[in-house]
Image (spheres, rainbow, N blue to C red):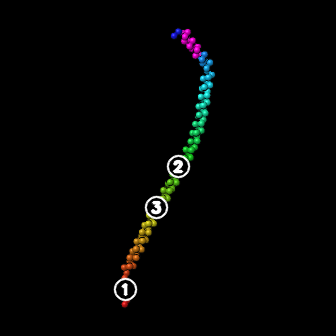
């Protein structure tokens, strides 16, 4: 390639850049504007999702706390029921023993 050819081609690119430079800039500006809008929308969506996440975390914490309370109440109720059953069993055993003792006593007749 001769010096003339390379300078001609360089000159051609310079002419194209000056002729079409505004078009490239407008396309780039439009793309940048589109990307800015998309970024803004994604940031809004992200903020909404973060708020929803915080609400869900709060609900989860509340549910976990309520579950712990229910477990405690259940165990208390269970332990109370076990003690009550044992008490009733003792009472029935005592009544049964007293009833058996009364039937073993034979009245003496005084004829």
Residue at 58% x, 14% y: name it. Answer: 12
In the image, is residue 88 above or below residue 2?
below
Rendering coords of residue 32 (x, y %): 60, 29
Q: Secondary structure at mark 1?
A: loop
Residue at 44% x, 66% y: name it. Answer: 85
Report the predominant secondary structure element of the magenta stretch. Answer: helix
**Residue 17 sits inside the magenta stretch:** no
Magenta part of the chain: 3-14
Which residue is labeled 3 in the image?
Answer: 78
Which residue is labeled 1 in the image?
Answer: 108
**Residue 6 sits inside the magenta stretch:** yes
Tell me the CA gap for discs 2 and 1.
76 Å
Residue at 60% x, 26% y: name it. Answer: 28
Is 29 on the left-hand or right-hand side of 104? right
Please give the label number shown on residue 60: 2
Residue at 46% x, 61% y: name it. Answer: 78
């Amino acid at each position: 390639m001769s010096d003339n050819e390379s300078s001609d081609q360089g000159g051609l690119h310079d002419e194209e850049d000056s002729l079409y430079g505004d078009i490239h800039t407008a396309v780039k500006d439009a793309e940048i504007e589109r990307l800015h809008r998309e970024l803004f929308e994604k940031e809004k969506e992200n903020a909404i999702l973060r708020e929803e996440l915080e609400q869900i975390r709060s609900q989860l914490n509340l549910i976990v706390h309520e579950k712990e309370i229910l477990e405690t109440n259940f165990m208390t109720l269970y332990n109370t029921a076990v003690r009550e059953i044992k008490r009733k069993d003792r009472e029935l055993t005592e009544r049964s023993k007293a009833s058996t003792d009364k039937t073993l006593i034979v009245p003496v007749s005084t004829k």
